Amino acid sequence: MEWQSVGFITTTKDYAFTPIVTGTLFKLKHTSAITTKSDLKIVIRQAFEDNGQLALFDYKLINCKVEQDILLFSLPKGLPSRRLAIKRVDSLSDSWIIEIESLTIVEDGADMPITLSDLVELQQQINSIQDALTLKALGIDLDNHVSDHYNPHNVTALQVGADIAGSAVTRVFEHEGTVNHPVASRDSKGMISAADKFKLDGIENNASANASDAYLVNRSNHTGLQPISTITSLQNALDSKQDNINVLPINKGGTGSSTQNFVDLTNNQTIGGIKTFNSPPAIAAATTTAAGYMAAADKTKLDAISPGATANSTDAYLLNRANHTGIQSIATIFDLQNILDAKEPSFTVLPIAKGGTGSSTQNFVDLSNNQTISAIKSFSGGEIGFTNLTRNHLLFNSAGIALPSFATRSVGTKWVLYPNLTATATDYAIGIAAGTFWHTIPQPNTNNKFSWFAGTNEIATLRGDGLFVTSKLIVNSVDAWIIPTLATGWTLFNSGYPTASYRKLPDGTVELKGTIKKSSTPTGGETIFTLPVGYRPMELRIFSTVSNNVLGRIDIAATGAVSFQLGSSAWLSLEGIRYIAEQ
């Protein structure tokens, strides 16, 4: 066999293309330093240009290995030329170089440089074969090939990429002797990618190179001191504070007493009994002077503002403190700390005598007995401690079951870890729905995710678009061969030959083996056996095989039916049939 060199391909995550090739049988030799070569995977497809667009067809998935691969790619009638397209589909960064050679198998009636017995010997190395039967099923007739060696397919100059005026080449990948131009990167020039062109079109003309919005609005990056007069209502709020306060003595137990029955605002304290918080009071609509719920008119006005009204915010907007986010140091506000140090909080202590301990009308927190507390209570200390020796839990009422929702907080919400509720986003929250314990992140996109940590190491993430990623992948061992129940009349071909079997590999590939025969003449389309759920393709797959030393065909349907289509009853090989399990 006279093999012709095609070249070397360094595999990457993007498709790499060979020069134009006319062969039909291809030999692949693999070079990689990785020990577990089977972890490296590529897809190989045929490629041609159709009306200025790159078209891909055929699909073969192979692993890196010590031995070489032999692949059969039929050249469809009417296609003047094509290339091979190779792309990495594993997640590893190890180098993998493939040397490619080709061999042309001539048409019927001429001598073949490779015999049928050679093809049978190569069968074990062929991962997937799409032969003339596959092309015929797609409407391409190989039997009517015209032996016109000058221009058998009436190919035009435009179809092969020539410029009509003869002054230029119209195909990007057919330039300077079929040399592929690489895409430009930070380190080397090249062709502009579609993603880079899309990004460039989104930048306004004469755009300034400002610092990022996040940097400019973050108060920790600001300089200078800010006058107190520039902070709305701060001076009035400070003026309303009392310079000092006199707290009347509390007769029942006194401050710090182990028998006191009130909340001590100064000292650490143990609170006994169960406190129940009723629903918060209704909140009024927002006004220009007070916060509240958004009115329908305000929402209508907000919706009338076009998204992305300006491509970039102005410097004046970014420097305006009213638009800033983040935490601002109190030291950056002129004399604020001194003014605050001179003030005391203003509050009123109600007499404990109002209602008495356990009374339904009492207006204080009872530290010893069970009590129902209405409205919202805020704990400025930032921490609630539970020190009971037998039980420490928060008990929620069984009412309130629903899935998360936008705009209005779901009644199923139990914990709001970070308020973020808008018309298009949820809180960071935990809640309950019917038969469901749910957690939410604001939006279903790649900017929001759930994460799991071991110490400070992020070991797994679940993105808002549903992608789950772990830092390590546990690869299961290869499944054992499964022997199916053959249909009536089908049996093992002979002792010493493999039994009809199937199994699934860790990457999801289903593999068949075995040599079988039938006691009577088989009918095209009859079922040999059926694959179970989990081993089936999503659509009909057609495979070429060898049957009694001639070409045979086996189909595998989405129902799992493995059916005879072409061949002999004497014997039929299942070797080399591989595909990805999709359902």
Image: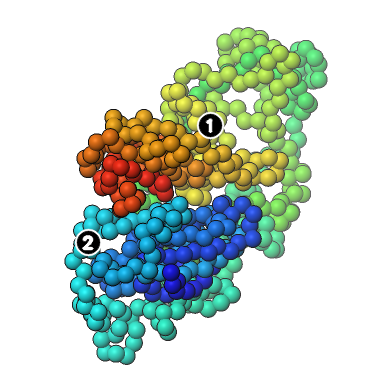
Quarter of the figure with the N terminus: bottom left
Question: Toward the viewer: 301 or 126?
Answer: 126
Task: Place residue 154 in its image quadrant.
Answer: bottom left
Q: Which residue is labeled 1 in the image?
A: 430
Q: Give how far across and how far down residue 178 sits, in percent.
A: 41, 79
SS type, badge 2: loop
Q: Within 10 angstroms of label 2, few (less than 14), some, or many (20 or more) residues?
A: some
| Residue 500: image location, x then y, percent | 40, 37
Q: Which mark is residue 140?
A: 2
Q: Which mark is residue 444?
A: none
* Amino acid found under the numbered disc labelled 2: Ile
Residue 558 visible somewhere in the drawing: no
Residue at 22% x, 61% y is 140
User: What residue is drawn where x is 62% and y is 30%?
Assistant: 378
Q: CA distance from mark 1 to mark 2?
A: 58 Å
Q: Position of residue 395 (x, y in %)?
A: 58, 18
